[in-house]
Structure formats: structure tokens, C-alpha cells
Amino acid sequence: MFDLFKRDPEQRRSWSERLREGLSVSRERLSRPLAAIVGRKPLSEATLEELESALLTADVGVPATERLLADLRARWKRSGADTDSQVLLKASLTDLLRTLESPLVVGPQRPFVIMLAGVNGAGKTTSIGKLAKWLQAQGLTVLLAAGDTFRAAAREQLEIWGKRNGVHVVAQRGGGDPAAVMFDAIAAARARGVDVVLADTAGRLPTQAHLMEELKKIRRVIAKAQEGAPHETLLVLDANTGQNALAQVVAFDAALGLTGLVLTKLDGTAKGGVVAAIAGTTPVPLKFIGVGEGIDDLRPFHADEFAEALVG
Ligand SMILES: Nc1nc2c(ncn2[C@@H]2O[C@H](COP(=O)(O)OP(=O)(O)O)[C@@H](O)[C@H]2O)c(=O)[nH]1
Ligand SMILES: [Mg+2]
């Protein structure tokens, strides 16, 4: 542990620092126009209008922006006209984002199966690698199911994460059937007494009907392999997708019945406001957020620390 500390200065920086830095582009997008007009001065109707366009450019979207502004107005009236506008905005945003807050809890089922889906490049495999470490840090044992059988490189990528975390990876040599991989992985987890199975899947677009059908089949086979599984079905979203993320949530939810979201690549995007858009439009719990490529750069989502990092 101490060795890791010495080798990697990233480890010394706290999560809140990394989150703040990761969200810096989005924060600037939001606060630069605000700072120019508002600073920390009291709110006014003109300020609210400026705020509206700032929120829209940060990908907060129309429904969530309207909700935020209505809430902000109400707070402003209640608290007296000279209240710090930034404090009010942070409070409104925190309340909105709280609808998404529901940290992942590994239940008593064994193995506890977590299935991940999403479009290509969203960050599914990388997130599985990071989650494996996060789960192990809680004293849980983990097994990875290489359900992306489309490309050999996908399996190899998962195997690298398996090695890094010292966890077993169940894969089928030479391509094969992803549903069969899931079946084998759950059987292997049971035989080895492993706590959690993280099930990777190949990327697909919601418009690729046959691939969405395949995803449903994978889910059915997981349920057959173990009653009640998958216990969590997570959609991995790239924050750079912006408003299109909402359409992905609706489509994958219709196919799979999502229990949560993982939002990756919040670092380096100006579209961090999409979190508020999701809260305002398609409030599926946001389980984890990713702010970098490091193994510790994926953490549970908390509304207050996110709002603080974005507008605090
Ligand atoms: N900057 C950044 N890159 C990320 C994050 N999450 C994943 N990536 C990168 O996104 C790329 C695609 O990730 P991958 O897990 O292979 O996507 P998949 O196709 O959904 O499995 C990789 O280069 C990852 O390192 C993140 O939170 N921040
Ligand atoms: Mg992948």
C-alpha cells in the first residue's frame, strides 16, 4: 500500500480534488458566463436569463434547466434577495441530482451478478477493471465474464484488467457465444465461491435491433443460470455523448430494464451538465462516475460532491 503511494502521486490526491479537476471543463463552461454577470452577487431576473443559457450550453437540457430555474426562483424568494447566488444554485442542483443518488450495494445473493452494456467505446471494459478493484477493496471476491466475443482484442483487454486485479476471467477461446460465456462464468463463480461476477458485453447501438435482441438473450441466460440475476444491469455512458445519452438510456432501459448508469469520461468534456439532464428527464440511478483512465478514477456518485465540483 505504501509502495503504491510512493510510486503513484495520483494516489495522494483525494477523490474530491480529482473530481473537481475532472469536471473543470464543464465547470468553466457553466461558471465563466456566470462569473461575468453574477460573481457572488445576488440573483436578479437578468441573471436568471443568463444562467438559463449557460445551463443549456452545458448540456443540462430544457426540462432540467426549467426545473432548476423554477427551484432557484423559489429559493431566491424564500431566502431574501441578497443571498449568494452561487449558494442557491448549488442547493438547487444538489436537490435535482439527488434523484439519481443510489449507491450500488452488493446484496446477499451469491454470486451477485452485475451486467454492463452500452455503445462501443463508452468505457464498459475499463469500468469493469476499475470496479473490480473497488469491489475488492470492500473485501469482496470478483470474477470477470468476457462477454464481448466479437473481437479477440476485447477479451485480451479484459484479461489485462483481470491480471492487474488478480482476478479470474472466464472467456471462450476463438470467439463464441456471449450467452454461453455468462453461463460458464456464473457456474465458475459458484464453484469457486466468488462473491461478484462482472459481466462485460460487446458495444452496440440502440438502433441495431438484432444486437439489442442478442443483449436480451444474454440477460435471459444470466437469469437462467441464476435466479434473480443479473442483480444490477448498468448502462455505461460516455459523458461526451451529451444529450444523446438520454436516448441511449431510454432504449437500453426498454431492452434490459436498467437498474443504474455509469457515466464515464467526465474529465475533459464540457458536457458534465448531462447529469442534470438525466435527472430531469430519465432518472435512472447514477451508480458510478468516471473522471479519468486511472484505476481509481471511477467512484460512486454523490449529488452534493458533484454539485460542489460543478458549481461550488
Ligand atoms: N479520460 C477518460 N477515459 C476513459 C474513461 N473511461 C474509459 N476511458 C477510455 O475510453 C476508451 C474506451 O474504453 P473501453 O472500456 O474499451 O470501452 P468499451 O468499448 O465500452 O468497453 C479507453 O481508451 C479508456 O481508457 C474516463 O472516465 N476518462
Ligand atoms: Mg469493451
Image (spheres, rainbow, N blue to C red):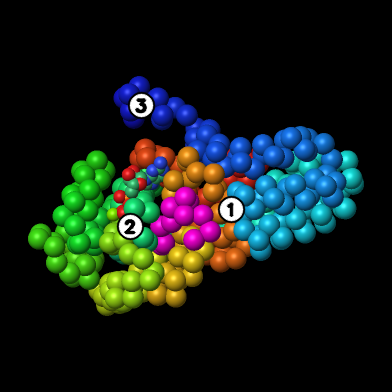
In the depicted view, which residue is nearer to us: 106 or 39? Answer: 39
Mark linked to residue 214: none
Residue 194 figure quarter: bottom left
Query: Is the Cβ of the residue at disc 1 closer than 8 Å to that at disc 3?
Result: no
Point out the stretch of residues depicted in magenta: 234-244
Which tag, 1 or 3, sits closer to the chain's start? Answer: 3
In the depicted view, which residue is nearer to us: 79 or 174? Answer: 174
Q: Residue at x 71, y 61 (%)?
A: 67
Which tag, 2 or 3, sits closer to the chain's start? Answer: 3
Q: Is residue 239 magenta?
A: yes
Query: Is the Cβ of the residue at disc 2 closer than 8 Å to that at disc 3?
Result: no
Instruction: Give the amino acid type for the residue marked by disc 1 in the picture.
Output: Asp
Which tag, 2 or 1, sits closer to the chain's start? Answer: 1
Instruction: Give the amino acid type for the residue marked by disc 2 in the picture.
Output: Asn
Residue ID for mark 1:
59
Q: Residue at x 24, y 41 (%)?
A: 164
Residue 35 figure quarter: top right
Element carrying mark 3: loop
Element carrying mark 2: loop
Q: Is residue 293 visible?
A: yes
Mark linked to residue 8: 3
Q: Residue at x 13, y 62 (%)?
A: 175
Q: Is mark 2 within 8 Å of ligand 1?
A: yes
Q: Residue furthest top?
A: 6
x then y, percent, for residue 272: 55, 48
Residue ID for mark 2:
120
x then y, percent, for residue 66: 72, 60
